[in-house]
Amino acid sequence: MKKIFIPLLIVWIIFFSFFWYLNRNYETPIFMYHSLDPERIDNYAAVAPDNFIKQMEYIDRHGYRVIELDEYCRLRRAGAPVPKKSLVITFDDGHKDNLVAFEVLKRFNFPATFFIIVDKLNSPSYLSRVDIAQALENPKITIGSHTVSEAYLPSLGPNELSYEIRNSKAALEDLFSKTIKFFSYTIGGYNRQTLKEVELAGYLCACTTNRGFSKKLTPFTLRRIKITDRDRGVRLWAKLSGFYDIFRKPKHPY
């Protein structure tokens, strides 16, 4: 009996420890999209419109709950748990083809946040002021700042850094009469001064792509998962699981 009991106990301990580790390291996925241009899927983080629809269908069909970035940030800052099988959807850059996303998201009643580069508003291949104003008629759509000029923030001096972070917020608030609560770092880049400036500017939270300090889930280093055209089936399930980054070695952001 003892010969059987000890191996079973060891197996039980390993099994319990593994699931304890998984539960402790679960992270609500924040999806990061860019373009929905089918001609860019081979050389850019783009998703073809048909595949974007299929991804949203998968999320809907399998009972995932898409929550607003605002809800996610407030729960994290309060130290409250985020319901399992939740996810957040974000878009960076404000490409013109995001018009497709507005319609698809409305069809599924999914919320999403679009991070806008101020200087690229009304530029060719980018959303116009009218596009965004019309999109914001849907209360599930919110916008955030992706800087004024898409500058790489860690390379800037104090005055330039303040300009990119504070003026982008002020400009978007003036244009759309909305409080801008969210910020996204260009190429996910930030340093200590950048984090301080974002907090002082009055943002609720900020998103990055970097897998470094955002492991701590601080409100100004929320890591996201890049979504591409290849993400379907098992790949999409893995990115929705909450454990996608668990075994990936963190990178130091600065």
Image (spheres, helix red, strand yellow):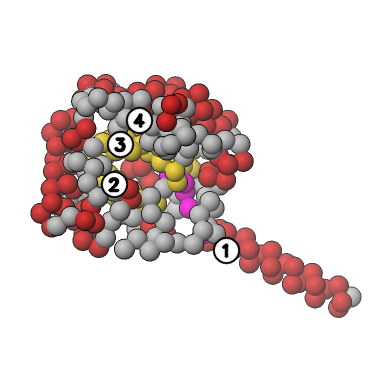
The residue located at (43%, 36%) in the rendering is: 43
- Residue at which label 3 appears: 93
Callout 3 secondary element: strand
- Name which residue type carries label 3: Asp
> Counting residues from the N terminus, which is met first, the one under dot 2 or under dot 3?
3
The Cα atoms of the two marked residues, 4 and 1, are separated by: 34 Å
Front residue of 115 and 216: 115
How far across and down, in percent of the image, does residue 136 sit? 28, 26
How far across and down, in percent of the image, does residue 140 sit? 35, 30
Bin the neighbour count of mark 2 within 10 Å (Cα to Cα): few under 14, some 14-19, many 20 and up.
Answer: many
Residue 148 seen in the current view: yes
Bin the neighbour count of mark 4 within 10 Å (Cα to Cα): few under 14, some 14-19, many 20 and up.
Answer: some
The Cα atoms of the two marked residues, 2 and 1, are separated by: 32 Å
Question: Would you say residue 98 sits in the magenta stretch?
Answer: no
The residue located at (61%, 36%) in the rendering is: 233
* Label ID, residue 140: 4
The span shown in magenta is 25-30
The Cα atoms of the two marked residues, 2 and 4, are separated by: 24 Å
- Residue at which label 2 appears: 186
* Label ID, residue 151: none
Bin the neighbour count of mark 3 within 10 Å (Cα to Cα): few under 14, some 14-19, many 20 and up.
Answer: many
The residue located at (25%, 63%) in the rendering is: 192
> Counting residues from the N terminus, which is met first, the one under dot 2 or under dot 4?
4
* Label ID, residue 21: 1
> Counting residues from the N terminus, which is met first, the one under dot 4 or under dot 3?
3
> Counting residues from the N terminus, which is met first, the one under dot 4 or under dot 1?
1
Residue 68 seen in the current view: no
Bin the neighbour count of mark 1 within 10 Å (Cα to Cα): few under 14, some 14-19, many 20 and up.
Answer: few
The residue located at (86%, 72%) in the rendering is: 4
